[in-house]
Image (cartoon, rainbow, N blue to C red):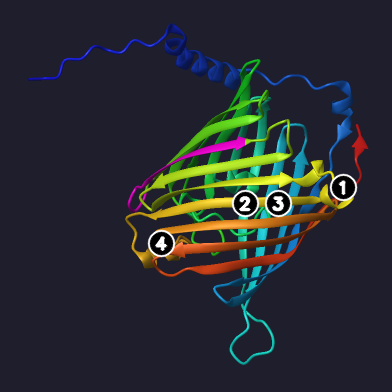
Amino acid sequence: MPCQYEKPRFPRRWRTLLPRLVGLLLLQFFSPARGHTQTAAQEKPVPILSGTVGVLPGITAGQTLLDVQFNPVLLVPLGERWLLESRGEFEGEFQRAPGARSFGGPVNKHLDYLQADYIANPYLTVTAGRFLTPFGIFNERLYPMWIRALQPDPLILRIATATSDGAMLRGGFPVSVRATFNYAAYVSVPSVGLEGVESERHVGGRAGFFFPGPRLEVGGSWQKALQDTRKNSVGLHVAWQPREVPLSLHSEFVRSDQGSGYWIEGAYRLSQARFWEKAMRRTEVVARGQQYFGGNLGADAAQSLGLPGVNTREADFGMNYFLKDGLKSVVSYGRQFSSAGNFNQWTFGIAYRFLIPLGRESHQ
């Protein structure tokens, strides 16, 4: 006998929220670009070369590793609507062989993104080329060594594809005086087989709400692979920066056939300390807790993707000291727990951020 149930009735406000949201999205999509002010129209932007350089020695499970990174970023504006941007990654992971006095090893080269952006209007940007996959928040917003509070990657970072080759629509618009909606939708094609520009065939998107009052963002991500196992990946993310204290909280949760897990991280700037004020206001303390649960992949396949081979837990603690604008020293300690063995992970070093205008700003 089929189960009888009464169709749930939702408040009228909730029944009309989705149609209103879709309507606003379509309205902003097709709205024309707003005119620029006379001052902005007279300014001609110039290309900018920026990026980060870092030397980050570390000791993982008793093995010393000298990690040297160089990540240049190039921005080239073309008129008022177009922007070309690119970031490369050069990383040398140098180790000392038994009996050797010096460190040696390969230098890995990778093209993180090379994309053309067309600013259709204040609510929509169209992107084509190679771009960072908008899945979660770490890959796009927190990955550069200067921005991230802890240098070791989260365990779940490689579950979803980090870079895509294809096209993307993204933007945002206010839905009320208390909330702003942001979105991204993309499609990716397989890479052409060149080393350092790998990609896969998939589609996906991300959506979220930002509440400026509490400075809170909550959102979700989805990705569908269109090759091999045709896996699905879903994720949730939260970012919060309360006004009352100099604290930044970030967290992500991901679930996929490749594995699942979460991480939560808090970074606190000691600018409110009452002792040694000059030194403390430049100091930031960080803590992160995370956990990974293995999926349908075997241990070897998971490790080839940069994921742990077994269920893993990890706790990390660190401190950053900002020597001056663009220069910081870092130190962190982590302890990893798994059936494959427990070990410590130390990281310390220095990171430098640079910015060089490639020309002089002119007026039209």
The residue identified by callout 3 is: 285
* Residue type, label 4: Ala
CA separation in Å, label 4 and label 1:
46 Å
Image coords of residue 75 (percent x, y): 75, 46
Q: Earlier in the sequence, mark 1 or mark 3?
A: 1
Which of labels 1 and 2 is toward the front?
A: 1
Viewer-closest of 318 and 255: 318
Q: Earlier in the sequence, mark 4 or mark 1?
A: 1
Q: Is residue 139 visible?
A: yes
The residue identified by callout 1 is: 277
- At 69% from the left and 89% from the top, the residue drawn is 101
* Residue type, label 1: Glu
The residue identified by callout 4 is: 302
Which of labels 1 and 3 is toward the front?
A: 1
Taking 326 as reference, is 252 above or below it?
Answer: above
Q: Quadrant of the C terminus?
A: top right
Which numbered marker is on residue 287? 2
Q: Earlier in the sequence, mark 1 or mark 2?
A: 1
Image coords of residue 99 (percent x, y): 62, 92
CA separation in Å, label 1 and label 2:
22 Å
Answer with left or right where residue 137 lies relative to residue 326: left
